[in-house]
Image (spheres, grey):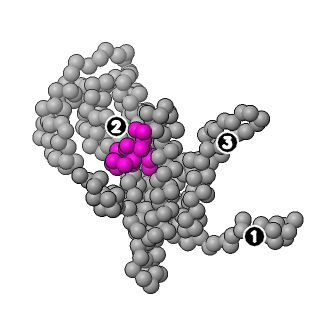
């Protein structure tokens, strides 16, 4: 049966490709960065819970509770009682060290010296013990996450340079083309290269939209015709393509107008994002085939009347 399938449906078979060792390493670092990001979110929720128990005024200082300056400030003033003993020069030096301009020294002390809430005896000590452990773990996660993000940049650049060096002509390599697309950042680029290197190298648009869950599923039975979302997809690619399209609506006018048009037609936010992601995948494959980076002003250059 396999031999007969190869004879009759040869176009459905393809040669196996040996994966670049750098892609294997990139996949490992990309998945590690995702795990560290999830761990940081989990620890941030625990920090919020502990501060809410005895130190709610400190939550007003920052929206992101895992930033290094916030963790260091808590170590300087772990309780409302010790916040009154902190020197202003120390806080000012710390804000300058981390280049914090959103809030000044007076604002920090005005928040920290708010009246403390009344809690039962031992609550402050117990919460402080838990907070010190959480902050120690957060410092490790932040350091590991910074190393992982730096490694992702290095590997993406190394893969792009190796691809450019192997080409005899002066064509653009795939990494540079993908990086030029709107909405593509460090994490999205690394995930696309690591998890979809095969379809990207083949410029296989249908495989990309299927793996990422963008292609819908059509169900027909008699007179019924239902089009639903595809759930059988690569989870990491699905999340990556979602965030790619979401960020593109914030930074690209064409993507923003496309999303708005889909919403006006009555589509939900998720359906509109999937439609926009489908367009971005098709555009990426076309640019990769033509070896041309993304140009946001291409339409205006091709038709000057549009810019008038």
At 22% across and 18% down in the image, what residue appears?
115
Magenta part mainly helix, strand or loop? helix
- Distance (Cα) linking label 3 and label 2: 44 Å
In the foreground, 257 or 108: 257
- Distance (Cα) linking label 2 and label 1: 56 Å
Question: Do tag 3 and tag 2 residues touch (Cβ < 8 Å)?
Answer: no
Q: Whole-percent x and y of residue 41?
A: 44, 39
Location of residue 188 (image quadrant):
bottom left
Q: Secondary structure at mark 2?
A: loop
Q: Which residue is mark 3?
A: 218
Q: Residue furthest bottom?
A: 168
Mark 2, other Cα within 10 Å: few <14 / some 14–19 / many ≥20: many
In the foreground, 43 or 213: 213
Q: Which residue is mark 1?
A: 10
Q: Whole-percent x and y of residue 176?
A: 40, 67
Q: Which residues are magenta?
A: 241-261
């Amino acid at each position: 049966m396999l031999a007969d399938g190869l004879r009759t449906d040869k176009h459905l078979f393809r040669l196996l490709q040996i994966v670049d060792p750098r892609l294997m390493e990139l996949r490992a670092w990309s998945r590690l960065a995702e795990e560290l990001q999830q761990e940081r979110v989990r620890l941030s929720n625990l920090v919020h819970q502990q501060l809410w128990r005895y130190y709610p005024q400190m939550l007003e200082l920052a929206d992101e509770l895992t930033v290094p300056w916030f963790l260091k400030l808590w170590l300087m003033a772990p309780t409302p009682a010790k916040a009154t003993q902190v020197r202003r020069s120390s806080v000012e030096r710390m804000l300058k060290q981390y280049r914090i301009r959103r809030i000044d020294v007076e604002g920090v002390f005005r928040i920290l010296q708010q009246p403390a809430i009344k809690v039962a005896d031992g609550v402050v000590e117990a919460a402080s013990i838990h907070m010190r452990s959480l902050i120690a773990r957060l410092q490790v996660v932040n350091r590991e996450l910074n190393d992982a993000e730096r490694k992702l940049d290095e590997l993406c650049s190394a893969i792009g340079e190796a691809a450019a060096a192997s080409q005899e002509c002066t064509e653009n390599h795939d990494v540079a083309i993908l990086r030029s697309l709107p909405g593509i950042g460090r994490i999205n680029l690394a995930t696309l290269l690591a998890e979809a290197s095969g379809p990207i190298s083949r410029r296989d648009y249908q495989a990309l939209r299927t793996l990422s869950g963008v292609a819908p599923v059509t169900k027909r039975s008699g007179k019924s015709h239902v089009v639903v979302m595809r759930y059988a997809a690569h989870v990491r690619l699905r999340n990556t393509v979602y965030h790619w399209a979401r960020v593109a609506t914030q930074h690209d006018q064409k993507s923003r107008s496309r999303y708005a048009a889909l919403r006006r037609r009555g589509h939900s936010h998720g359906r509109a994002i999937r439609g926009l992601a489908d367009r971005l995948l098709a555009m990426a494959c076309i640019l990769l085939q033509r070896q041309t980076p993304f140009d946001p002003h291409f339409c205006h250059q091709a038709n000057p009347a549009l810019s008038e």
